[in-house]
Amino acid sequence: DNSANLKAFWRMGGGAGDDTRDGLIADQTKVGYGAEEVTNHEFEVGTFDGSGTNWGPENTGGSGDAIQIIAGTLRIQSSGDSSNELGAIQNGILTIGDIYRLDISISDCTGDGASILTKGGTGGSSVTHAASLGNGYHYKHFKASGENLKIFRATQDSATTFKVNYISV
């Protein structure tokens, strides 16, 4: 027993910023996140252009596929007749290797729901961080594998429709 030699003890894992579900133990004295990385997280109409600062469509092309911003929500609809990752992307907003917290609210979900991935950029790779998200509020901590953030349908060749009411990273 070496307890007599113990000078100090700090219990980790019970702090305000900890998320044991995702394996995140925060700094006990400086809990917090950086600045918001996602612009247009409430999906303003007229800013869906893929310019890098706004959301843009990716892998559209299937008959009956639609990506729209309607009344402040992002709506993704796939007829299921194509094998692409139909979705919306915001380019160049993440730093590869950094840890982020994703908050997302999904509604009107049919089919297999939504997935979130980071992809691309210099030295980046595609990794799905949250899959098959259905109706409701979801959060997830993830390590960025790419510079781009994408919301897409969970299953290729599957009819899926969902709305994203809010997203924050």
Image: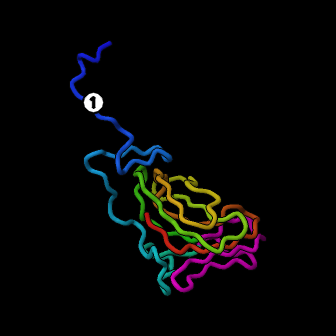
Q: Which residues are magenta?
A: 58-87
Apparent side of residue 156 relative to residue 32 in the rendered image (left or right): right
Tell whether 65 sits left or right of 89: right
Where's residue 97, x and y in %? 42, 49
Q: Is residue 106 magenta?
A: no
Residue 108, quarter of picture = bottom right
**Residue for point 41% across, 73% down:** 39
Residue pushed farthest left?
Answer: 7
The foreground one among 150 and 61 is 150
Q: How many marks?
A: 1
Q: Quadrant of the C terminus?
A: bottom left
Q: Position of residue 96 (x, y in %)?
A: 43, 53
Image colouring: rainbow
Q: Quadrant of the N terminus?
A: top left
Q: Quarter-wise, where is residue 40 in the image?
A: bottom left
Residue 63 is one of the magenta-drawn residues:
yes
Eyeballing the image, is 154 above or below 2?
below
User: Label 1, on which residue?
Assistant: 9
For the point 60% across and 75% down, which residue is it?
163
Q: Residue at x 42, y 60 (%)?
A: 94
Name the residue at the top extreme.
Answer: 1
Q: Position of residue 7 (x, y in %)?
A: 21, 24
Taking the spot 56% from the left edge, 53% from the top edge, the residue there is 127
Query: What amino acid does circle 1 point to?
Result: Phe
Image coordinates for residue 69, horizontal then vertical, percent: 56, 82
Give the structural element (helix, strand or loop) at label 1: loop
Q: Is residue 19 above or below residue 86?
A: above
Which of the pair 74/22 is nearer the observer?
Answer: 22
Q: Residues within 10 Å of mark 1 (few under 14, many from 20)?
A: few
